[in-house]
Amino acid sequence: MNSFIRLFSIAVLLILVQPAAYSQLLRNTQEVEIKTSAQCPMCKESIEEMLTFERGVRHALLDMETKIVTVRYNSRRTDADRLRKAITKLGYDADDMEGDSEAYENLPACCKKPDDPDHVAH
Ligand SMILES: [Cu+2]
């Protein structure tokens, strides 16, 4: 009986504490839309995957139509400029930040910008 009471009070405690933790989580959650220079599904995949492993990021989804990546992140652990910077390190532009030129050079031809002579469409 004693252990039942203990289990019961732990359950009650969890039910009481969880919404508080959850609302804290929601409060710190921010969303930003970043315009990228992604060209193909490969770009989409590598940008999304990189962002997913980036500190503070909860979710990243790149829309191939608009090339805009929507990133949900913990504002206590990262910020929009840090996310933009991470995207430029892959060689892609992020809003006003230009992609790292060395990383850009190393991108496959299909991932280069359409006005680039090196660009090859699929
Ligand atoms: Cu690509």
Image (tube, rainbow, N blue to C red):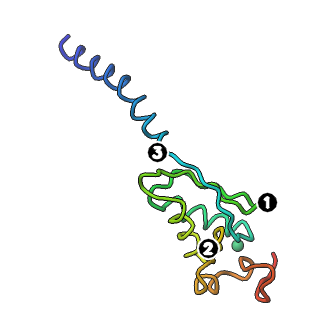
The amino acid on which the numbered mark 3 sits, given as a three-letter code, is: Asn
Left or right of 25: which side holds 120? right
Q: Is residue 106 above or below residue 50?
A: below
Measure the C-alpha gap from mark 1 to mark 2.
20 Å
For this orientation, the residue located farthest to the top is: 1
* Tag of residue 75: none
Q: Which residue is mark 3?
A: 28
Q: Which residue is mark 2?
A: 97
Q: Quadrant of the C terminus?
A: bottom right
Left or right of 30: which side holds 68? right
Q: Give the percent coordinates (x, y) of residue 60.
A: 59, 55
Q: Give the percent coordinates (x, y) of residue 93.
A: 65, 73
For this orientation, the residue located farthest to the front is: 96
Q: Which residue is mark 1?
A: 65
Q: Earlier in the sequence, mark 1 or mark 2?
A: 1
Measure the C-alpha gap from mark 2 to mark 3.
25 Å
Q: Nearer the viewer, mark 1 or mark 2?
A: 2
| Element under disc 3 | helix
Pick whichever, 20 or 3, lies toward us: 20
Circle 1 packing at 10 Å, graded few (<14), some (14-19), many (20+), is: few
